[in-house]
Image (cartoon, rainbow, N blue to C red):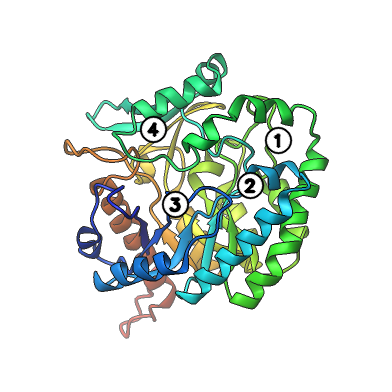
Amino acid sequence: MIMRWFPGGDDSVTLKQIKQVPGVSGVATCLPDVPVGEVWPLDRLIALKEEINNAGLEVEVIESVNIHEEIKKGLPTRDRYIENYIKTMANLAAIGVKCLCYNFMPVIDWARSDLATPLPDGSTVLSYRHEQVLKMNPAKIADVMLSQARGYSLPGWEPERLAAMAADIEFYQSMTPEDYWKNIKYFLAAVVPYAEKYGIKMAIHPDDPPWPLYGLPKLITNAEGIRTFLSLYDSVYNGLTLCTGSLGANPDNNLPALIREFTAQGRVHFAHIRNVKHHSSRDFDECAHLSSCGNLDMYAIVKAFYDNGFDGYIRPDHGRMIWEEKARPGYGLYDRALGVTYLLGLWEAISKMKTEQPEENGVSSPQ
C-alpha cells in the first residue's frame, strides 16, 4: 500500500505524515518540473530516493514519466524522445524503481469540469459533467482546473502542453484509431525490451474519462481496448495500472470481471482503487471509498484482486477534501488516509476468510 506524493514543495502532505498512516510502506512520486520528453537526471533521482528513504518509506513506483506528444503523433522526431525515455528508465532502475505508471492519452491526460464540487456532507470532490465539458474548449477547462489547483501543479496540464493544445487537437482529427494503435505499438516495441532489461514493470493508465472527447482517440477504455493493448507486446513487463475510478466512470464496465481477467494473466502491476458516484452514463462525482458512498462494489473489487493473486502496488488514488483541509485537489491527506484504512481492512478480512481453518468445535470459518 502506497500513496502518491509530489516532491520539491509541490505537496501539502509531508512524508512524515504519510509514514504515520498505518500500513503505508512507500510513495509513488515523480519529478514534475522536468519538461516532458527530457531525461530525468540521475543525481536528482538519487536525492529524491534518499529523501523518501530517510522518512522511513520506499520508492519503487514512479508516476508518471509523461510521453512526449510527438511519440503519440507518430512523427519522425519521436525516436529522440523515445531514446530519452529509455535513458530515464535506466536512471529509474539505478534507484530501485520496479514499476512505472504512465499513459498514452493524446493531448489531455484527464479532464474534470470542477475540482471542488460540494457534497451534502460538506466535503468537496472532483467531478465531471459531460455536456458542460463539451461546451468548454480545452483552454477553458485548463483555466477552470488551474484556478482551482491551489497553486499546485496539475500533472498532464503543464504550461508547455497548454500552449500547443488547440493545434494538437486539430492534428488528431485526421488520425484513425488504427493509426493510433500503430503509434502505441511502435513505442512499446522500442521500450518494453528495456523494461525487461531493467526489471521495471510498465503499467499503462486507462483513459480518463473512458470515452471520446474533442475527437481525440480514446482506446484504453474497456476490456476490449485493454486486450488489444496487451496483445501489441506480449510480455509481463507490458502491463496495466488498473484504475477503478477511471474505468468505473463508465457504468458499462464490469470492474470485478476486468480485474479477474487481467490480474489472473499477471498483467496488472499497479492498482488505483477508489469509488465513483454516477449521475448518468457520462456524469459522475469522485466520492468516498466506502461502497455505499458510490456505485462501485469495493468489496467485490478488492476480492477480485485478492482471489487472482495480485501482488503489485495499491494506492487509494484520489480522495475528497474534508475537515477543512487545504490541499491539491484529490490529494489531501485525510480522506486518502481513510481510504488506505478501508482498503486494508477489506484486504485483511478477505484474506482471513480465505485462510482461517474450521474451529475445533465444528463451527466453520466464513466462506
Q: Give the residue displayed 17% in from the left and 35% down from the top.
A: 324
What residue type is disc 4 on?
Leu
Between the residue at mark 1 and the residue at mark 2, the CA separation in whole angstroms equals: 10 Å
Q: Which residue is mark 3?
A: 273
Q: Is residue 88 visible?
A: yes
Secondary structure beneath dot 4 equals: strand
Task: Return the residue nearer the eye: 91 or 250.
Answer: 91
Mark 1 / mark 3, whichever is N-terminal: 1
Q: Residue under label 2, please give it.
A: 104
Q: CA distance from mark 1 to mark 4?
A: 23 Å
- Label located before the other in sequence (3 or 2): 2
> Which label's residue is closer to the chain start, 1 or 4?
4
Q: CA distance from mark 3 to mark 2?
A: 20 Å
Q: Are marks 3 and 2 in contact (CB under 8 Å)?
A: no
N-term mark: 1 or 2: 2
Q: CA distance from mark 4 to mark 3?
A: 15 Å
**What kind of element bears circle 3?**
loop
Residue reaching furthest to the bottom: 360
The front one of 338 and 8 is 8
Reading the image, the residue beneath label 4 is 126
Q: Is residue 194 above or below residue 327?
A: below
